[in-house]
Amino acid sequence: MSTAQVYRTVDVPVRGGNLRVGVWEPDATEGAGPPTADVPTIVAVHGVTASHRCWDMVAERLPGFRIVAPDLRGRGRSNALPGPFGMSQHADDLANVLDFLAIPRAMVVGHSMGGFVAVMFAHRHPGRTGGVLLVDGGLTLPMPEGLTTDSLIAALGPAADRLTMTFPDHETYQQFWRVHPAFVDSWNKAVTDYVDYDLTGTAPEFRPSTTVEAMTGDIPDQYGTPAMLEAVAALPSPTILLRSPRGFFNDEPGLYPPDRIRYWQDQLPGLEVREVAGVNHYTILFSDVGAAAVTGAVMQTLQRALS
């Protein structure tokens, strides 16, 4: 019989205000689950314009575990938190979450930009890291030829444009995403819940919850600041990277082309790359096959940490 699971949110004091955190854990009422202190914890970190609700399908497949997933600074219900941003700040916010929840040590799994946060957390807080799993993120990307960090941020105009758009109701925002190439053939309840949660404000001027300042403030680390490169070089060995063969727009070759994967395998002999067939950068979390691959890698990473 599977263990019942409950979901709640908590607000954690951090620099500048409160960080909203989603928590899924076994239901300990009436003997349905183990005592809270005995539940292993997984910290799950979302991507650059996402929220903790991207982890719904993964969390429901891990009923015997505690999943702690923040809305990162500048996103979701943490979007009022001020900068400066960057992976070091996010990593330290995670440490504050563990302190608040009295969790001494946890495995960290990060998707997309969340992978960079996970890598930085492991580097800055190694004694609190019980394994790292990267999901189509976490390894620095090559700067496109002819671009600098400033010009790259300017080139992100379409993504930034969405963050400044307004929507009269949730149905209109759902339709905006339903026609997105990543979801046009892959819509499900988890995507609906995620998209609905992303809107903040009131009708008729709902807007996406991520701030432009947070997105642009977090871009440089993903392209190789000295601090980020140092953290990647110290990545625990072995570490699994789940790679999607398709990218943000369901396009090949995905965020990490084969030549970039080979580069990082040469740099990090302990890197174990697994391609998850049939998914894109989003559906690696929002599909049965993707969520199953993530939960399988979570279990293996935890087993290795205990061996």
Image: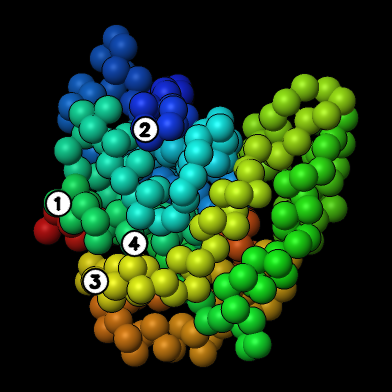
Give me the residue at 67% from left, 42% from top: 191
Tell me the element at label 1: helix
Q: Is residue 229 visible to the viewer in this orientation of the structure?
A: yes
Disc with the residue nearer the chain's start (1 vs 2): 2
> Which percent across, then down, holds residue 55?
51, 43
Question: For the residues carrying marks 2 and 3, which lies nearer the camera in this image?
Answer: 2
* Disc 2/disc 3 C-alpha distance (Å): 26 Å
Name the residue tied to disc 2: 14
Question: For the residues carrying marks 1 and 2, which lies nearer the camera in this image?
Answer: 2
> Between 200 and 134, which is closer to the camera in this rendering?
200
Tell me the element at label 4: helix
Disc with the residue nearer the chain's start (1 vs 4): 4
Name the residue tied to disc 4: 119
Confirm or deny contact between disc 4 and disc 2 (CB under 8 A). no
Question: For the residues carrying marks 4 and 2, which lies nearer the camera in this image?
Answer: 2
Q: Is residue 209 above or below residue 183?
A: above
* Disc 4/disc 2 C-alpha distance (Å): 20 Å
Name the residue tied to disc 1: 127
Is 195 left, or right, of 169 in this rendering?
left
Quarter where residue 202 is shown:
top right
